[in-house]
Amino acid sequence: MYEAVKLAAIVHKVNGEPYEDWFGAADAWDLATRQGARALGAEVGVIEPGSSADLCLLSIEHGAFTPMNDPILHLALQIPTGAIEHLMVNGNWVLRDSTLTGVDEAELLAEAREIGPGLVDSHQKAFAFGDALLPSISTGWHTVNSTPNENFDSDV
C-alpha cells in the first residue's frame, strides 16, 4: 500500500503540471485511507471493542521518520514498511513486536525455499514463450509511438 500511496503522490509531476495543481502526500494518504474505506462502505476512525479495526503501528524511531518534519510526508513518500511493529487486521493481531502471529515464519520460509526452485522451473516454458513474443511486442510499441495520431490531443 505504501508504494501505491507514494506513486499517487508523485506520478502526476512528470507531466509538467503546475505546482498548484499537484496531488500531494496528504491527498494520496487520504485517498488510500479514509476515501478507500468510504468507497467500501466501511466506518473509519473508530477504535473500540467490537469494531473491525485495521491498525498499523509504526516506530517513529525508524530511519524513515528521521529527521521528523511532516509525518504524512514520511508515511506517503518514505515507504516505511520496515518501521511496522504491530499490525491488526479485522480486530486480530497478525504482527506483534515485528513478529508474525499464528504462523511459524522460519518454517514458512524454509518451505518456500524448498519448493520455490521447482515452481520457477515449472514456468520456464511460459517464460520462453514470453521471450519469443518480446520482439513483436517491441516492434508494435515502437510503431504505435512513432505514428502521428490526429485523434490524439498531445496537450491532454
Image: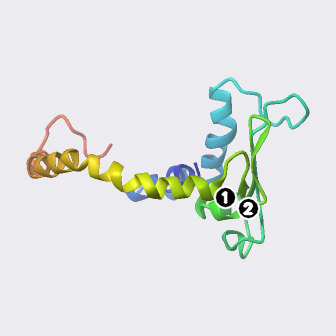
The reply to whether dot 2 and dot 1 touch (C-beta < 8 Å) is yes
Q: Quadrant of residue 96?
A: bottom right
Residue 80 location (% of width, % of height): 64, 62
User: 55 above or below 74?
Assistant: above
Picture quadrant where residue 15 is located = bottom left
- Look at 11% across and 49% down and name the residue there: 132
For the residue carrying disc 2, how many other residues have a C-alpha within 10 Å: few (<14), some (14-19), or many (20+)? Answer: few
Residue bearing mark 1 = 75
Q: Secondary structure at mark 2?
A: helix
Tag count: 2
Q: Which residue is mark 2?
A: 71
The residue positioned 81% from the left and 37% from the top of the image is 45
Q: Is residue 6 visible?
A: no
Closer to the camera in the image, 55 or 86? 86
Residue in front for this viewpoint, 76 or 152? 76
Q: CA distance from mark 2 to mark 1?
A: 6 Å
Q: Residue at x 64, y 48 (%)?
A: 29
Is any atom of residue 5 visible in this view?
Answer: yes
Q: What type is the residue that disc 1 sits on?
A: Leu
